Image: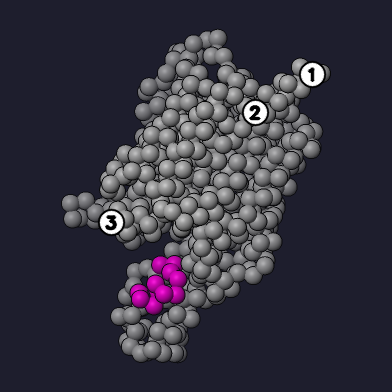
C-alpha cells in the first residue's frame, strides 16, 4: 500500500510541470494582448506590427506542432519537452529585451512559437505513455483545465504586471515561469522509444507545414482581407493583391486544403514503405479518433469565439480593464477547470458519449443568456450565468476528448496523436474566429448602414458619407466619434450615429453569439462513433 501511495504521489508531481507548460503557452498570448498599448508607445510599433507579432506565434504553433508530434517519437518526449521549454525561455528573454519591433517579432515571438511547437505535443505525448486507465483520463482532464486556468489568470496576472511595472517585466516573468517548467521536468517520467525505429518523414513534414500555413493564414485573414469582395487585401509593391478581382483569403485557404489532401495521399505511401509516417492511417480510418479530433477543434473554436465576442464587448463597450476582464472570464474558467478534472476523478465510469453530448448541449444553449445579457453600454448578470454553463460544457467535453483519441489507437499512435491534436486546436480556433469575424463584419456594416440610411434624424450629407463607407468597424464610443467627425454635418448627426452604433454593436454581437451556439450544436453530429462505456486503455 505504501508503494502504491508513493507511486501515486510521484505521478501527481510529474503532472504539475505538464499542466504548467500548457498554462504558460496559453498565458503567453494574454501578455501580448494586454501589452498592446505599451508596445505601441515604447517600440514605436503600429497595430499591424502587433497583429503580425501575434500571428507569427500562432502560425508557428499551428504549422509545426504536427511535426513536433513526430520528433518526440524519434528523440524522446522528455527531451523534446525540455528543448521546447528552453526555446520558450530564450524567446521570452529576447522579447523582454527587444529594442525594436523587428527583434520582438522575428526573434522573440518566433522562438516562443517554435518552442511551443515542441513543448505542447510533448505534454500530450507523455500522458499516454505515463498514465493508464483512470489516471490517464484525469491527466488529460487536468490539461484541459489548464487552458481554463490560463484564460482566467492570464489577463489578471499580465494586467497587474504591466500596470504596476512594465511590459518588459511581464515577459521577463514569462521567461522565469518557463525556467520553472524546465526545472520541473526532472519530476516527469520518461517514455521509452518505440521498439520499431521511427523514421523522420521529411516530405510529409514539408507538405504538412505548407498546407497548414496556407489554411491557417487564409482562414484567419478572411475578416481582414474579405471573403469574396476585397476589403483590405495585402499590398505588394504598391499594388493590392487580389485573385481575379476577389479577396485572396479564401483562395489561399482552399489551396491549403488541397495541399493537405495531397498530404494524405503522400502519407499513405510513406507508411506502406517505412511503417511510420507523419499522419498514421489509424487517425484517418478510425471513426472514434476523428470524433475526438472534431471535439478538440470544437473546444478551441469555443475559446477563440468567446474571446473574440465576449472580451471584445466587455473591453470596448463595457469599458472593462484587463484585470476586470480576467475576473469576469473566471465565470467561464472555474466551472471548466472543475468539470475537466472532476468528471474523470468523481465519475470515472461515466459514458464518454453521454458526457460529451451533454457538454455540447450546455455550450450551445449557454450562448442564449450571454446574448440576452448585452446592453448598449455593457452587460447584465445573464452574461455570467451564460459564461458559467459555457465553461461547464467545455469542461465536460475537455474531460473526454483527448482520452477518446488516445484510447482508440495503439500506444505509439496514441503518443504521436499529440501533434495532430495540437494542430487541430489551432485550425479550430482559426476557423471559429474567421467565421465570427465575417459575421460581425457584414452584420456591423450592413446593420449600421441600413439603420443610418433609414433614420429621419440624419442629414442628407451624413447619409451620403455613410453610404460610401466600404465597412464599419467594431469601435467604442470615443473611437467611433473620432471616426465620424468628418462625416457629419451637425451635432445632431453625431448623436444619432453614436446611438445607431451602440445598437448595432449590441445586435451584431448577439448574432455572433447565436452563430457560435449554432456551430457548437453541429458538433453533436460527430458524436455517433464515441464509446458508450468507459475507456479502459
Task: Tell me where the magenta segment starts and ends, as one range.
Answer: 473-483
Which residue is labeled 3 in the image?
A: 44
Per the image, is 368 magenta? no
Q: Is residue 58 visible?
A: no
Identify which residue is drawn at 52% across, 22% down. Answer: 78
Which residue is outermost to the front?
165
Query: Which of the numbered marks, if any, corresponds to residue 2?
Result: 1
Find out whether the residues at labels 2 and 1 contact each other: C-beta distance under 8 Å. Answer: no
Most foreground residue, 455 or 321: 321
Task: Tell me if mark 3 has few (under 14), some (14-19) or many (20+) residues whose alpha carbon lies within 10 angstroms of its own.
Answer: few
Instruction: Report how far apart the C-alphas of labels 2 and 1 lie in the structure.
Output: 17 Å
**Rendered location of residue 340, percent (x, y):** 68, 41
Find out whether the residues at labels 1 and 3 contact each other: C-beta distance under 8 Å. Answer: no
Q: Nearer the viewer, mark 1 or mark 3?
A: 1
Residue 360's place in the image compared with 117, above or below, is below
Magenta residues, dominant SS class: helix
Task: Give the secondary structure at mark 2.
Answer: helix
Instruction: Report how far apart the C-alphas of labels 1 and 3 lie in the structure.
Output: 60 Å
Q: Earlier in the sequence, mark 2 or mark 3?
A: 2
**Rendered location of residue 451, percent (x, y):** 47, 79
Task: Tell me if mark 2 has few (under 14), some (14-19) or many (20+) residues whose alpha carbon lies within 10 angstroms of its own.
Answer: some
Task: Tell me if mark 1 has few (under 14), some (14-19) or many (20+) residues whose alpha carbon lies within 10 angstroms of its own.
Answer: few
Task: Give the secondary structure at mark 1.
Answer: helix
**Rendered location of residue 386, percent (x, y):** 67, 60
Q: Earlier in the sequence, mark 1 or mark 3?
A: 1
Q: Earlier in the sequence, mark 2 or mark 1?
A: 1
Most foreground residue, 447 or 416: 416
Which residue is labeled 2 in the image?
A: 13
Identify which residue is drawn at 57% across, 50% down. Answer: 153
Coloration of the structure image: one colour
Amino acid at each position: 500500500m505504501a508503494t502504491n501511495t508513493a507511486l501515486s504521489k510521484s505521478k501527481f508531481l510529474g503532472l504539475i510541470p505538464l499542466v504548467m507548460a500548457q498554462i504558460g503557452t496559453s498565458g503567453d498570448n494574454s501578455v501580448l494582448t494586454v501589452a498592446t498599448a505599451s508596445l505601441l508607445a515604447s517600440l514605436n510599433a503600429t497595430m499591424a506590427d502587433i497583429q503580425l507579432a501575434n500571428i507569427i506565434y500562432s502560425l508557428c504553433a499551428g504549422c509545426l506542432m504536427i511535426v513536433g508530434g513526430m520528433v518526440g517519437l524519434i528523440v524522446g518526449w522528455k527531451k523534446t519537452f525540455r528543448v521546447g521549454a528552453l526555446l520558450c525561455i530564450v524567446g521570452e528573454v529576447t522579447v523582454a529585451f527587444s529594442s525594436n519591433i523587428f527583434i520582438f517579432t522575428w526573434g522573440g515571438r518566433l522562438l516562443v512559437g517554435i518552442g511551443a511547437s515542441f513543448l505542447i505535443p510533448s505534454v500530450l505525448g507523455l500522458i499516454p505513455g505515463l498514465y493508464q486507465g483512470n489516471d490517464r483520463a484525469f491527466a488529460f482532464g487536468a490539461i484541459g483545465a489548464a487552458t481554463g486556468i490560463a484564460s482566467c489568470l492570464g489577463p489578471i496576472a499580465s494586467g497587474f504586471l504591466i500596470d504596476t511595472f512594465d511590459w518588459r517585466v511581464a515577459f521577463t516573468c514569462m521567461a522565469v515561469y518557463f525556467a520553472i517548467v524546465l526545472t520541473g521536468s526532472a519530476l516527469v517520467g520518461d517514455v521509452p522509444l518505440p521498439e520499431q525505429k521511427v523514421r523522420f518523414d521529411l516530405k510529409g513534414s514539408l507538405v504538412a507545414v505548407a498546407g497548414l500555413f496556407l489554411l491557417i493564414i487564409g482562414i484567419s485573414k478572411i475578416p481582414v482581407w474579405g471573403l469574396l469582395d476585397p476589403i483590405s487585401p495585402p499590398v505588394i509593391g504598391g499594388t493590392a493583391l487580389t485573385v481575379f478581382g476577389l479577396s485572396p483569403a479564401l483562395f489561399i485557404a482552399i489551396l491549403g486544403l488541397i495541399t493537405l489532401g495531397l498530404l494524405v495521399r503522400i502519407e499513405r505511401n510513406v507508411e506502406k514503405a517505412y511503417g511510420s509516417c507523419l499522419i498514421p492511417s489509424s487517425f484517418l480510418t478510425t471513426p472514434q479518433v476523428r470524433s475526438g479530433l472534431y471535439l478538440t477543434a470544437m473546444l478551441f473554436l469555443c475559446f477563440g469565439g468567446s474571446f473574440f465576442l465576449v472580451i471584445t464587448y466587455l473591453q470596448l463597450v463595457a469599458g472593462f480593464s484587463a484585470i476586470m476582464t480576467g475576473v469576469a472570464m473566471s465565470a467561464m474558467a472555474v466551472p471548466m477547470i472543475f468539470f475537466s478534472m472532476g468528471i474523470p476523478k468523481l465519475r470515472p465510469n461515466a459514458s464518454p458519449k453521454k458526457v460529451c453530448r451533454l457538454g455540447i448541449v450546455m455550450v450551445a444553449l449557454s450562448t442564449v443568456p450571454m446574448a440576452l445579457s448585452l446592453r448598449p453600454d455593457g452587460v447584465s448578470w445573464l452574461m455570467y450565468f451564460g459564461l458559467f454553463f459555457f465553461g461547464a460544457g467545455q469542461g465536460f467535453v475537455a474531460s473526454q476528448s483527448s482520452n477518446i483519441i488516445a484510447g482508440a489507437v495503439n500506444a505509439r499512435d496514441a503518443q504521436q496523436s499529440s501533434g495532430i491534436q495540437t494542430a487541430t486546436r489551432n485550425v479550430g480556433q482559426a476557423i471559429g474566429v474567421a467565421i465570427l469575424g465575417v459575421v460581425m463584419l457584414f452584420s456591423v456594416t450592413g446593420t449600421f448602414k441600413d439603420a443610418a440610411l433609414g433614420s429621419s434624424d440624419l442629414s442628407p450629407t451624413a447619409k451620403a458619407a455613410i453610404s460610401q463607407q466600404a465597412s464599419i468597424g467594431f469601435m467604442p464610443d470615443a473611437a467611433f466619434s473620432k471616426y465620424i467627425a468628418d462625416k457629419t454635418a451637425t451635432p445632431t448627426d453625431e448623436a444619432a450615429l453614436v446611438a445607431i452604433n451602440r445598437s448595432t454593436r449590441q445586435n451584431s454581437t448577439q448574432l455572433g453569439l447565436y452563430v457560435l451556439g449554432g456551430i457548437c450544436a453541429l458538433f453533436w453530429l460527430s458524436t455517433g462513433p464515441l464509446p458508450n462505456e468507459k475507456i479502459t486503455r
